[in-house]
Image (spheres, helix red, strand yellow):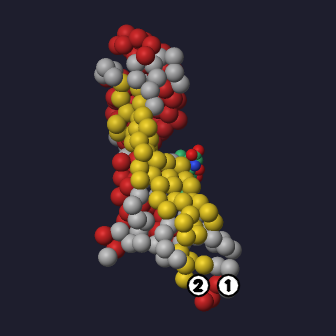
Amino acid sequence: MLPDVELAEPVDALVGRLILMHLADSVTVVKELTRCVRPGGLVTFQEINISRARAIPDVPLVTTCREWICAAQREAGSNPDMGEQLAQVLWSAGLARPEVAVAVSTGGADSPAVSLIAETVRSLLPLIERGGAADARTEDIDTLRGRLLARVRAGAGDRLPVGAGRRVGAARVVRGVRRMPSAGPTHRRPEYEAGPAHR
Ligand SMILES: C[S@@+](CC[C@H](N)C(=O)[O-])C[C@H]1O[C@@H](n2cnc3c(N)ncnc32)[C@H](O)[C@@H]1O
């Protein structure tokens, strides 16, 4: 289980996708795992912003599904908006000058987006209901995809954007290394530049 990772020698890069959102203390995990990365190595994570997902123009059923998915994530102890917090997490973990790029997937009725929404709701239904979303209890999950498709098509045709923002954050481990006396000559621990939160 993260962050308990033991490595014999430092690695070139620490890469994660859709993992920080599930961790109770993402800052500590990044901080601990960054110690396994060599100086000059890369630390990069991709995380999502679910609460920003929407149809343009608005399709209320898409918005309702988004709220259910966010409620399920919170019920499970996950953070549906880790994407927008990614820079802060990297910064708070002591990484200097983290850079974050944002990508928003778009796609209309013919894209996988509608199926993704419907199937995500299907798989999370027990959590959605446990989270208290009363309206989800009466949802006919088998017809959800068809209704979403019809409403997306009615709203804006095939080129309707439906997307949740993904953020990719990256930072390099800087400065030299300090030998760890107990770990032998090959095990080095990087000293990384502290952000303001650590000064
Ligand atoms: C949304 S999936 C992402 C999987 C994969 N990284 C990807 O992008 O396809 C989240 C993953 O995080 C794992 N996970 C959640 N909490 C964890 C923890 N404390 N330690 C290790 N893995 C964890 C889950 O088992 C699951 O495989």
Residue 166 on image: x %, y %: 44, 41
Residue 24 to residue 32: above or below: above
SS for tag 1? loop
Residue 21 on image: x %, y %: 45, 52
Q: Considering the image in quadrants, where does the N terminus appear?
A: bottom right
Question: 175 or 153, which is in the foreground?
Answer: 175
Amino acid at the residue labelled 2: Arg
Q: Residue at x 48, y 69 (%)?
A: 174
Q: Residue at x 34, y 36 (%)?
A: 52
Q: Residue at x 52, y 77 (%)?
A: 176
Question: 147 or 168, which is in the foreground?
Answer: 168
Q: Which residue is mark 2?
A: 179
Question: 147 or 130, which is in the foreground?
Answer: 147
Q: Residue at x 49, y 62 (%)?
A: 172
Q: Considering only order in the chain, which callout, 1 or 2, is on the residue closer to the N terminus?
A: 2
Residue 137 visible, this angle: no
Q: Which residue is mark 1?
A: 185
Q: Considering the image in quadrants, where does the C terminus appear?
A: bottom left
Q: CA distance from mark 2 to mark 1?
A: 7 Å
